[in-house]
Image (tube, rainbow, N blue to C red):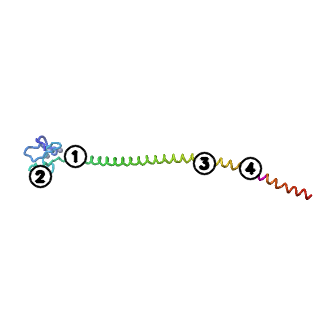
Amino acid sequence: MPKYKDGKCPKCQVVVKNDDSSIGCELCEKWYHIKCQGISESELKFIAEHKELNLHWFCLTCDKNFKGVLQELCKLNSRVDIVETKFDDLDLRCNGLESKYDSLEGNYSGLATKCVDLGNKYRGVEKDLTTLSREVKEMTSDILAMKLQMQEPERFLTSCLK
Ligand SMILES: [Zn+2]
Ligand SMILES: [Zn+2]
């Protein structure tokens, strides 16, 4: 509690005298009449008689301000918590995306290898087809030659019958 009483009670603007029942605010160090702060004589007596309890008193103005500051601090603190949670969440999602990107990259190189494989296989099949069509052509001409040979005896027989 502030040591000296000086000046007016901020509430009623009446000078606080030494023999007035008054109480000093520890924050703004102003003295108030106890009736101006809603404190009873017995409460003041209790505070005076129990210095060992180290009771602190703040005037209603300081208390209100302090409560306001405390509320703002609490709000700010919970907002910091929210931002921190969001940041953690973002961090997690970033990690998730990173591993997805890695696996996509892996899939992509797998696909690229498969494409090259398919291209090689296609070229092989194309080569096989060329060989096959050449063989088919050869076989066709063989068949034609055989047909011609088979027609020969027929022609011979016909000429004999004439
Ligand atoms: Zn007063
Ligand atoms: Zn005060």
Q: Quadrant of residue 12?
A: top left
Mark 1 neighbour class, 10 Å CA radius: few under 14, some 14 to 19, many 20 or more: some
What amino acid type should be assigned to the residue bearing mark 3?
A: Lys
How far apart marks 2 and 1 lie (CA) works out to: 22 Å
Mark 4 lies within 8 Å of ligand 2 (Cβ measured):
no
Q: Is residue 141 magenta?
A: yes
Position of residue 18 measured from the top left corner of the image (x, y, whole percent): 8, 43
Q: Quadrant of the C terminus?
A: bottom right
Residue that numbered label 4 is attached to:
138
Who's the residue at 15% across and 49% down the image? 37
The residue to which callout 3 is attached is 121
| N-terminal-most mark, 4 or 2 | 2
- Per the rendering, the mark at residue 66 is 1
Q: Please tell me whether mark 4 sits on a helix, a strand or a loop.
A: helix
- Marks 3 and 4, the one that precedes in the sequence: 3
For discs 3 and 4, the disc positioned in front in the rendered view = 4
